[in-house]
């Protein structure tokens, strides 16, 4: 069985920390289910990895600010944001939902001359602003050369040691299957 958290990549391409964090938390739940299954058996290898890193995300905040990001509801309308809202209304809503207020002036700068929120035009910039207020910054919207982890649990996981080429994943899986 292969489970992919592909939306993590999409969210990181958009430099959108709120969605990326939510996607990582959902992947963590899926890995938890796989580990629970593997712990009850002796014949199941669980591998967790990525094919690349995207965005060059840097976290400079503490856990409290990241917890605030995790509280943000997605999609935005689930958080109560609606087309036509003013900067003041959005500032009040983010303070209530996030415990990390986003200043009205910064939101007003996103909304431009109309002063009214439009999900299509302002949704992504608002999510980026919220991420920045929570201490998340980015180096690119593309892929990076940052190494990714390969983590394993179960028979064959002892072969995962130190830094290795990503092609070693196939050999680890093949050997675990006895092939």
Image (cartoon, rainbow, N blue to C red):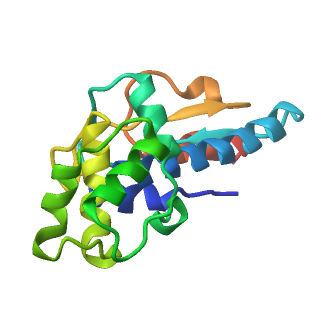
In percent of width and height, residue 60 lies at 27, 26
Location of residue 127 with respect to 45 vertically, above or below: below
Location of residue 124 with respect to 130 vertically, above or below: below
In percent of width and height, residue 29 lies at 67, 44
Which quadrant is the N terminus positioned in?
bottom right
Q: How many labels does the image show?
A: 0
Nearest to the observer: residue 143 or residue 158: 143
Nearest to the observer: residue 177 or residue 142: 142
Q: Looking at the image, which residue is at 63% across and 47% down?
A: 174
Q: Looking at the image, which residue is at 32% across and 51% down?
A: 91
Query: In the rendered view, does 142 fall on the left or right side of 21?
Result: left
Res 137 → quadrant = top left
> Is residue 43 visible in the rendered structure shown here?
yes
Res 110 → quadrant = bottom left
Query: In the rendered view, does 159 fall on the left or right side of 55?
Result: right
In percent of width and height, residue 46 lies at 67, 40
Q: Looking at the image, which residue is at 29% across and 71% down?
A: 117
In percent of width and height, residue 112 lies at 12, 70
Query: In the rendered view, does 163 fall on the left or right side of 150?
Result: left
> Is residue 57 visible in the rendered structure shown here?
no
């Amino acid at each position: 069985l292969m489970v992919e958290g592909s939306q993590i990549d999409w969210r990181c391409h958009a430099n959108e920390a709120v969605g990326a964090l939510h996607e990582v938390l959902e992947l963590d739940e899926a890995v938890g289910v796989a580990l629970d299954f593997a712990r009850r058996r002796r014949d199941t290898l669980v591998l967790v990895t990525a094919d690349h890193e995207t965005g060059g995300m840097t976290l400079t905040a503490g856990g409290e600010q990241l917890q605030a990001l995790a509280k943000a509801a997605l999609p935005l309308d689930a958080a109560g944001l609606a087309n036509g809202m003013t900067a003041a209304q959005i500032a009040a809503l983010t303070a209530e939902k996030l415990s990390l207020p986003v200043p009205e002036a910064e939101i007003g700068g996103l909304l431009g001359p109309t002063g009214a929120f439009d999900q299509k035009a302002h949704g992504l910039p608002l999510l980026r602003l919220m991420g920045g207020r929570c201490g998340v910054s980015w180096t690119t919207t593309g892929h990076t050369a940052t190494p990714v982890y390969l983590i394993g649990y179960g028979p064959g996981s002892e072969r995962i040691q130190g830094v290795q080429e990503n092609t070693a994943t196939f050999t680890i899986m093949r050997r675990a299957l006895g092939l």
